[in-house]
Image (cartoon, grey):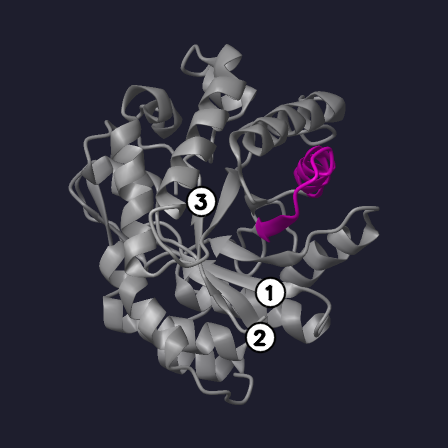
């Protein structure tokens, strides 16, 4: 495989389309399917080879916060069908990936959620995404060993290939202390393994690319590697978040991500259609270059371990973490 271009943000773009802070984006699969289709279709038009379903938090634990824990099958199936409709609007191959995010609760022994309950939640979501017509499953923004194992075990109950991504947003590790190389090691220990592994979300492009570089250096050529970075650093402007990267900067990000060995590249929070178009151009124009060092990454994309988002003095909103 040469390279595949992923899409951009889901949650942060839906806010621009009218989603209210604190509401569940996943409910829009039933309430406003035309807006979700517009988002998916926009990324297809911008050049994405793979689009994610609007299901990041579409598991029983997160939906329970909105009184919708009994709608896991309905909402995941609808999201997959919407993604399928968007993918079929073009003559080229576009793959629909079922987004599976964290459960929002800590699993034993760190937390109180039982491992088998967590596994069942992931299984229910994965099977619904398969029924809805997804081509693959996309496990993302994972931070703990226990949750990664539960998510992979759930995905393995389907017949679909799956990818796994961690969020390395705490000085090069996940918030539960897992390094990028350790993330790969956990996957290697399991009976069923992903076809691709990488980094998503986090802080900004520099951190995501650095994580992907660590993976590909530690385990070269063992997996397809992924980089799906936030669109720059999040900046609070009043109660709103703005992401700082320009389309031109995301062009540079795609180039250097590809040179780390990543073959699946896209954007996460804050990434809009214009950014994706520029990344499409970047990958189309990519010529093989030497693998970058950390110094190269910092020169092009900024400091790797500067992980504190810029804030203003005004009150921040209570927006939940969302792609």
The magenta span reads 145-165
Quadrant assignment for the N terminus: bottom right
Q: Nearer the viewer, residue 140 or 86?
A: 86
Q: Earlier in the sequence, mark 3 or mark 2?
A: 3
Residue 147 appears at what percent x and percent y?
66, 37
Residue at the spot 47% in from the left edge and 72% down from the top edge: 257
Q: Nearer the viewer, residue 269 or 100?
A: 100
Image depth: mark 1 or mark 3 in front: 3
Q: Which residue is mark 1?
A: 225
How far separated are the C-alphas under marks 2 and 1?
7 Å
Residue farthest toward the front in the current orientation of the protein: 91
Q: Is residue 272 left or right of residue 96?
A: left
Q: Quadrant of residue 218?
A: bottom right
Residue contact between numbered discs 3 and 2, judged by CB atoms under 8 Å: no
How far separated are the C-alphas under marks 3 and 2?
22 Å
Residue 235 appears at what percent x and percent y?
25, 52
Q: Which residue is mark 3?
A: 52
The answer to if 152 sits in the magenta stretch is: yes
Residue 119 appears at what percent x and percent y?
70, 28
Secondary structure of the residue carrying numbered label 2: loop
Say if 308 sits above or below 10 in the image.
below
Secondary structure of the residue carrying numbered label 3: strand
Q: Quadrant of residue 112?
A: top right
Residue 261: assigned label: 2
Q: Earlier in the sequence, mark 1 or mark 3?
A: 3
Residue contact between numbered discs 2 and 1, judged by CB atoms under 8 Å: yes
Image depth: mark 3 or mark 2 in front: 3
Say if 304 sits above or below 323 in the image.
below
The answer to if 180 sits in the magenta stretch is: no
């Amino acid at each position: 495989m040469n390279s595949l271009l992923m899409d951009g943000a889901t949650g942060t773009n839906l806010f621009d389309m009218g989603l209210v802070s604190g509401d569940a984006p996943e409910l829009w699969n039933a309430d406003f399917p035309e807006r979700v289709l517009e988002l998916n279709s926009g990324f297809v038009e911008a050049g994405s080879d793979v689009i994610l379903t609007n299901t990041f938090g579409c598991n029983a634990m997160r939906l329970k916060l909105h009184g919708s824990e009994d709608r896991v099958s309905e909402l995941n199936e609808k999201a997959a069908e919407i993604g399928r409709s968007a993918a079929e609007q073009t003559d080229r191959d576009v793959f629909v990936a079922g987004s599976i995010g964290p459960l929002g609760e800590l699993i034993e022994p760190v937390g109180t959620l039982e491992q088998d309950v967590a596994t069942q939640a992931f299984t229910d979501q994965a099977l619904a995404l398969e029924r809805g017509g997804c081509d693959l499953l996309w496990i993302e923004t994972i931070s703990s060993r226990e949750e990664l194992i539960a998510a992979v075990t759930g995905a393995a109950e389907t017949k679909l290939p799956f990818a796994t991504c961690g969020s390395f947003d705490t000085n090069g590790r996940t918030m539960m202390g897992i390094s990028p190389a350790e993330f790969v090691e956990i996957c290697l220990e399991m009976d069923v393994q992903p076809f691709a592994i990488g980094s998503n979300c986090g802080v900004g492009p520099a951190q995501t690319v650095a994580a992907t570089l660590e993976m590909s250096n530690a385990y070269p050529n063992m997996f397809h590697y992924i980089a799906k970075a936030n669109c720059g650093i999040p900046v609070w402007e009043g109660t709103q978040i703005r992401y700082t990267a320009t389309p031109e900067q995301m062009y540079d990000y795609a180039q250097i991500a590809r040179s780390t060995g990543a073959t699946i590249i896209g954007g996460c929070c804050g990434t809009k259609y214009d950014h994706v178009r520029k990344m499409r151009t970047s990958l189309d124009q990519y010529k093989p270059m030497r693998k970058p060092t950390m110094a190269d990454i910092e020169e092009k994309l900024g400091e790797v371990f500067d992980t504190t988002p810029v804030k203003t003095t005004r009150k921040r909103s209570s927006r939940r973490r969302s792609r």
